[in-house]
Image (spheres, grey):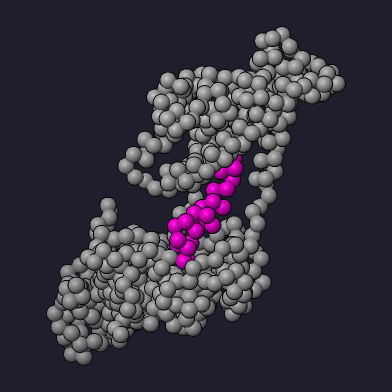
Amino acid sequence: MGSALEVELRHRLSRLDLEVAFTAGRETLALVGPSGSGKSTILHAIAGLFRPGRGKVVSGDRTLLDTDRRIVVPPEDRRVGLVFQHGGLFPFLNVLSNVAYGVRGDRRAREESARSVLERFGISHLAEARPGTLSGGERQRVALARALASDPEILLLDEPLSALDAVTRSEVAAELEMRLDEAALPTILVSHDFTDVLGLADRVLVIHEGRVVQTGRPAELLEAPASGFVASLAGVNYCVGHAARRGELTEVRNEDWPVPIRSADAAEGPVAVVVYPWEVSIAATLPQGSALNAVSGAVRRVAVVGNRARVTLDSRPPIVAEVTGESARHLELEPGAVVVASWKATSTRLVRAPMGIDRAQA
Amino acid sequence: MLFGFVALPILAIFLRVPVSTLLAQLGSHVALQALLVSLRSTAVALVVIVLFGTPAAYILGTKRFRGSRTLTAILELPLVLPPAVAGIALFAAFGRFGLLGGTLRAFGIELPFTEAAVVLALTYVALPFYTRQAVAAFASMDHELLGASRTLGAGRTATFFHVALPLARQGLSAGAALAWARALGEFGATILFAGSLVGKTQTLPLAIYEQFSAGNTNAALAMSALLVTVSATLFVGVRLFLRTRPVAEVPEWDRPLRSSSATV
């Protein structure tokens, strides 16, 4: 047997030209991309809720869709579990009945099976509750329990975390990770937020305007984003220049930059520079040291996330730094304030320039 | 002012004649017969409307296809048709010498001046009151829930009964109540197409008109009071029904086992 799931889709939508092909084993595959990039459409096509112009979906040895051979298995026979962004729970049924809805067998067997699933998920106390009275996190737990109770062969999750607040989000993410491990199903998770899938996904497919622009493990994407688009999605600094060796270090030049960027990586010719925001520090004045990169610029934006602050500088190249909230307050980082961002040459990764990589991927 | 304007005439029905006279009149043969005809024919019409109107409204409310707007508009035609015109139209179509009259007679069916004709007239005028609400109710459903039902193994039909109907329940009940109220008060189409034969086609509104034109004001008032009472009971009943929540339990249906897999 080859892959557990094979997907090939081609569809022309009014605003989007969708063309993707990928396979998944018993792993969690994340489709990441901005909203409108076609991610949800892909999920709906796999589930059978949307029929693409051309396409093929094979689960194990069962063909669920093959437009060339005119095979279209209706959604109810696909054994594909789909968890919707807001849960998609039936408001007129209580939690127990929602979970029992997808279980096969006679009424008693279904109710028993639903009860045992609720117990396994630690949400038995919610059995009689109406979906309308549940919190966002509880709704997602019930939705996942319902999908898994129907004994699917493939599990699809549509933005399972995006409707949740930050605290609930990390809780649900942790539980999701555990349940997905337990279920050991080919799982496809859709998200517009790269950080959401970091702990969950074994592999990430970056989707942009209906195409897969890069595939890899989450860490690979962080280390070597194939384009500025992937980098900005992953939240890392990314800029392109021309590399030349200077003794121990490599200097990357770009005519827009006042000074070259120095890296400990060896490279020649066109390269892309990748710097993690958490390896950039912010100071009021220029720090000393030749192995250090430093650019100055005015603060454009300060976004506080928990006890961290993401600071965007209007420098050349533009730099995003992630500093502690404390130092952000200490430096009085307000939009307009001119500061210096610095990072070590050893924190400066050089990867292949985008054109080459994009071609190789396509 | 406005509320008084609406409420006063209704109150007047009950105040014009002493209660004892009202009750005495109600015992009359004619009133009882008319009430029976009214209840029977409106009930049958409502069943027909709900039975045929619901699936049609579901399709019109959930699917967009070529001509769906036209079909929706056609269903609403009786709303703008004056009832008398509707009666004449029915007569022209299904009457003895109407378009389909000959065909119907060939099958031994004679519609005009039968209770079936009353049902036909009521169905015709009251149908859009139900379908309008039903189409809106189905259209405003969260379509994600229909998709959820399908991925959980329920086919189209099961999804209709177990998800669409409960979701649209409020709208459907409100529409049914409106249609019933409209049918109960129907006058023009009925008198033209079905006539006003006591015990056969004479509904309460027709009986009221007949008594009133015969100068029998007390009887007309008594029957009006009766009709108001029936309508009001209906109205309050629907309100109460809509306020209760539907039962929440594991749906009472067995799904055929999906091939290729064992039960959990």
Residue A276 location (% of width, % of height) = 35, 78
Q: Nearer the viewer, residue B152 or A71?
A: A71
Quarter assignment of residue B185: top right
Against A296, residue B117 (above or below) is: above
Give the overall secondary structure of the magenta segment: helix
Against A126, residue A61 (above or below) is: below
Residue lying furthest left: A269
Mark yes or no: residue A320 visible. no
Residue A284 location (% of width, % of height) = 40, 72
Residue lying furthest right: B20
Instruction: Confirm whether the magenta stretch covers residue A332.
Output: no
Mark yes or no: residue A98 visible. yes
Residue A63 location (% of width, % of height) = 31, 72
Instruction: Confirm whether the magenta stretch covers residue B163.
Output: yes
Q: Nearer the viewer, residue B43 or A140?
A: B43
- Which portion, as a residue range, is magenta? B148-174
